[in-house]
Amino acid sequence: MSSSPLLPIINPDKCGDEAEQKIERKPRSLTMLWLDHPIFLFGDVVKGFGRGSKQLGIPTANFAESVIKSLPKNFKTGIYFGLAQVPSYSQEVFNMVMSCGWNPFYQNEKLSAETHIIHDFPNEFYGVELRVLIAGYIRPEWNFTHVKHLIKAIKDDIAFAEKTICTKDMAKWKRMFFES
Ligand code: ADP
Ligand code: RBF
Ligand code: MG
């Protein structure tokens, strides 16, 4: 099986603790990590299963199916990073990590698009507009043998996103996509 330079070397039959140790997280090429064309999505925040905050301690603001359908046809599911704004809360644009996929750990039957905004919000914000700019790809979704490994992987994604986003000047994208 040939693998893209971005994909980790991982045996899909052995996803879990052991495979997790072997994952090479560093992208081989930064130009392949950043999307050629960032993807802008917006829509109201809807209710999901409520697992993000309760089981993982990492809340994710979920988009409705109608927003997910607006993703490009050739969109590859996986974990992404980028920018996010909740205009009713603040005009500030935050860094984010996003899962667009099937949540194999929970065996979801529907595709979800969920954004963890890297900011401490004082309250929940259901039913209000969320804007995201998907700027780069981190990894495919994985399955895990224990929820603690899923949490660790997400925390690593957050650290990776923060480190990567600050390598690029985002001022132009912020002006283009978030100034209303
Ligand atoms: P659900 O399954 O309904 O999406 P979660 O447990 O994932 O529930 O929690 C998501 C909700 O938590 C969001 O819809 C939002 O209202 C709130 N929230 C609070 N802080 C954040 C954050 N930093 N990023 C995303 N959502 C957050
Ligand atoms: N779910 C998975 O099943 N496998 C993953 O590898 C995975 N990675 C994620 C990475 C990030 C940055 C985020 C925000 C979520 C990820 N999820 C993953 C989705 C997670 O299971 C989901 O957010 C919770 O189930 C709450 O809805
Ligand atoms: Mg959620």
Image (cartoon, rainbow, N blue to C red):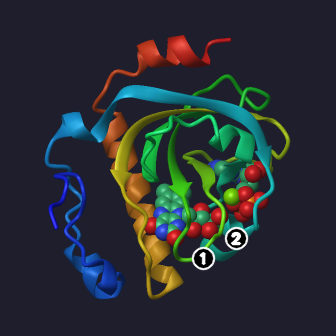
Q: What mark, if any, has residue 51 been given in the picture? A: 2
Rounded to the nearest angstrom, the CA distance separating label 2 from label 1 is: 10 Å
Disc 2 vs disc 1: Cβ atoms closer than 8 Å?
Answer: yes
- The residue that label 1 is drawn on is 106
Q: Is residue 76 left or right of residue 163?
A: right
Q: How many marks?
A: 2
Does residue 91 show up? Answer: yes
Q: Residues within 10 Å of mark 2 (few under 14, many from 20)?
A: few
Identify residue type, mark 2. Arg
Q: Residue at left 56%, top 17%?
A: 177
Identify the disc placed on residue 84.
none
Residue at 31% from the left image edge and 35% from the top image edge: 34
Residue 7 lies left or right of residue 35; in this view the side is left
- Measured as percent of width and height from the top left, residue 24 is found at 19, 64
Would the CB of label 1 be found within 8 Å of ligand 2?
yes
**Residue 36 in the image: above or below residue 176:** below
Residue at 28% x, 32% y: name it.
Answer: 167
Q: Is residue 57 visible?
A: no
User: Residue 102 location in percent, x, y?
Assistant: 56, 64
Q: Is residue 177 above or below residue 167?
A: above
Say if disc 2 is inside 8 Å of ligand 2: yes
